[in-house]
Image (cartoon, grey):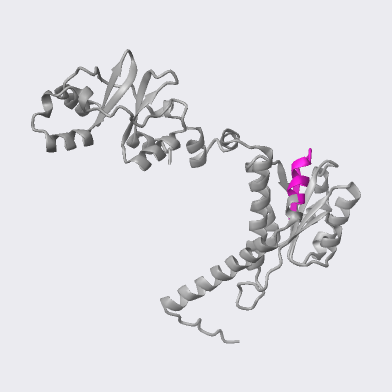
Amino acid sequence: MPVEAPARLDAAALIALGRRVLELEAASIHAAAGRLDARFARAVELLARSTGRVIVSGVGKSGLIARKLAATLTSTGTAASYLHPVDSLHGDLGIVGADDVAILLSKSGGSDELLGLIGSLQRLGVPIVAITGDADSMLTRAAVVVLDAAVAEEACPFDLAPTSSTAVALALGDALALALVEVKGVRMEDFAALHPGGSIGRRLLLRVRDVMVVPGRILSPSALMRDAVVSLAHDRGLAIVAEAGRLAGVLTTGDLTRLADRDAGFIERPVAEVMNRAPRTAAPDDLAGAAVGVMQRHGVMVLPVVAPKGDIVGVVHLHDLLRAGAV
């Protein structure tokens, strides 16, 4: 049988096809959000009360979404395991305990491979949260809570390949996982402990104290601007002014430029007349990413690091934060 040559589409047509898929999937998620009701709250409460783990399962493309949901739950503080429905009938059911809760994903709710697992969970007394597109299916009837994942059409041109339906299932799973983060009071420090490696770990574990450097020459308020010029050159654009070890103010290269433009004799002025007495600062225990945010919002490249009692303990530079992977 001869194979037909693929249709030749120009860039505009390809972009239109891509947009159609995204718009259909986005519309399906938006519709699912509009149908969210008290059943979602019951599902979250059921999962939050569980003293066991969450067993997540599905077949085919739903199985892939189930794997992702199990990973998201685990990484956000809720212990979860993916269980293949077929493998569950050949020994893997041993991971399921009486205190567990199950989340089963299925567009039709009646996949043959899923029915055996449903029966096993019922015999064990494990409550089931269903994410399904069929309101009258075997899975729906077996579930304690059903989340409506129905879609008007798949984004596939033949309305066959799971696309819109998997997007909705994925979004509902994310909604459950992140609602649990709020209910359980998971803190940023807890999240960081679960992600010690990679860019997430660096962003959540890296503190200002890990990146700051020892301040150079610290000026007194009576010092002259000629002294500040030297400090700015040596200390990468920040001159710190202190009294009795406490921060009194700062000068930046920007301050120096603006002053020079309007006062030719600025070099002999006391720094106390020129310095910023309410500068932006960082604390040693601040997240490095938070310090970057302060710098970006206020257009500065360097911050003095001040201990809780006001003592100057360091200086943190934007370039060092970026090099350390704070963003």
The quarter of the rendered structure image containing the C terminus is: top left
Q: Is residue 55 visible?
A: yes
Segment colored magenta: 42-57
Count of number-bearing discs: 0
**Residue 160 horizontal side relative to residue 126, left or right:** left
Q: Position of residue 264 (x, y in %)?
A: 8, 33
Q: Position of residue 121 (x, y in %)?
A: 86, 51
Query: In the rendered image of this protein, does residue 211 appear above or below residue 38?
Result: above
Q: Is residue 163 visible?
A: no
Q: Position of residue 28 (x, y in %)?
A: 63, 67
Query: Is residue 45 within the magenta segment?
Result: yes
| Residue in the picture at 71% in, 44% down | 80
> Which residue extends farthest front?
273
Q: Position of residue 100 (x, y in %)?
A: 80, 43
Res 307 quadrant in image:
top left
| Residue in the picture at 88% in, 52% down | 122
> Which residue extends farthest left?
264
Query: Is residue 253 within the magenta segment?
Result: no
The answer to which of 189 and 81 lies nearer the viewer is 189
The quarter of the rendered structure image containing the N terminus is: bottom right
